[in-house]
Image (cartoon, rainbow, N blue to C red):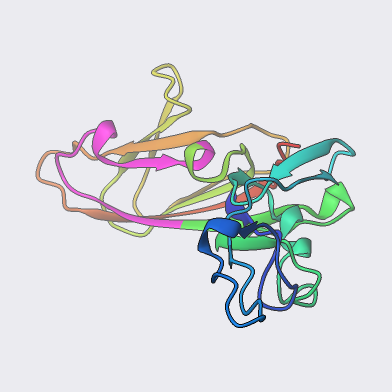
């Protein structure tokens, strides 16, 4: 998920609310300043159609988290005078109006130290992306076997030998998290690489 902020005005769009308390007093027959702009606006909200055809109310200055559908309203995807969204944090995912195209890869690399337990080596796919994986590839690049726990389930643990790769193909299994332990007596650390494919989930 990415983080966005609503900005209903910017340097290319004139002004919203003016604060009369900051106006320069009338002097010599000239009104030289009508007041400084209130940022964020205390008056302005808009309704915008979201990716699931649900209208979302956005208030100036509001910060929200959602899929990258909202990047299409941010500069430079649109011209500055038309932009009303600022991207605060981009998770690198894509958004397409074709749902089948809304998948993107994420890669994890971790060192599973000898003697470490599951809680020490967590790959939190759902926590990081807000979605379950549709494809998982786990490669043990070391020489020592590691145990792999799927979705925090103590009944779903398997051993992955050094140099081996385990693949869960699309629709085989929805994976939300993986944990690794390495309790081989006299063993060494193992480097593990996890490649997952996740689908962008939109909240509106």
Q: Is 182 on the left or on the right of 152, as rendered?
A: left
Q: Nearer the viewer, residue 60 or 21?
A: 21
Q: Is 120 on the left or on the right of 41, as rendered?
A: left
Looking at the picture, how far across and down is residue 121, in whole percent?
30, 42
Q: Nearer the viewer, residue 156 or 102?
A: 102
| Residue 125, magenta (yes or no) | yes
- Looking at the rendering, the stretch of residues picked out in magenta corresponds to 108-126
Q: Nearer the viewer, residue 23 or 39?
A: 23
Q: Does residue 25 lie above or below 188 as drawn?
A: below
Residue at the image point whose x is 33% and y is 39% from the top? 180
Looking at the picture, how far across and down is residue 167, in whole percent?
58, 46
Observer able to see residue 39? no
Q: Does residue 184 lie above or below 107 as drawn?
A: above
Q: Is 56 on the left or on the right of 22, as rendered?
A: right
| Residue 86, magenta (yes or no) | no
Looking at the picture, how far across and down is residue 185, in whole percent?
12, 39
Looking at the picture, how far across and down is residue 146, in whole percent?
31, 42
Q: Does residue 81 lie above or below 203 as drawn?
A: below
Q: Residue furthest top?
A: 155
Q: Quadrant of residue 65?
A: top right
Q: Nearer the viewer, residue 137 or 69?
A: 69
């Amino acid at each position: 998920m990415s983080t966005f902020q609503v900005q209903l005005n910017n340097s290319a769009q004139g002004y919203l609310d003016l604060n009369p308390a900051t106006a320069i007093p009338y002097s010599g027959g000239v009104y030289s300043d009508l007041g400084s702009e209130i940022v964020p606006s205390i008056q302005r909200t808009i309704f915008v159609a979201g990716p699931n055809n649900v209208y979302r109310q956005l208030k100036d200055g509001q910060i929200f988290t959602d899929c990258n559908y909202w990047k299409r309203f941010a500069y430079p995807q649109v011209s500055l005078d038309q932009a009303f969204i600022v991207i605060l944090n981009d998770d690198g995912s894509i958004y397409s109006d074709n749902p089948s195209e809304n998948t993107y890869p994420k890669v994890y690399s971790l060192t599973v130290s000898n003697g470490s337990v599951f809680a020490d080596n967590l790959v939190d796919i759902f926590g990081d992306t807000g979605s379950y994986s549709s494809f998982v590839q786990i490669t043990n690049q070391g020489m020592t076997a590691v145990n792999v726990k799927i979705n925090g389930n103590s009944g779903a643990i398997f051993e992955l030998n050094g140099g081996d790769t385990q693949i869960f193909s699309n629709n085989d299994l929805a994976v939300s998290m993986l944990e690794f332990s390495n309790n081989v007596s006299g063993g060494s650390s193992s480097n593990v690489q996890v490649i997952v494919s996740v689908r962008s989930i939109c909240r509106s």
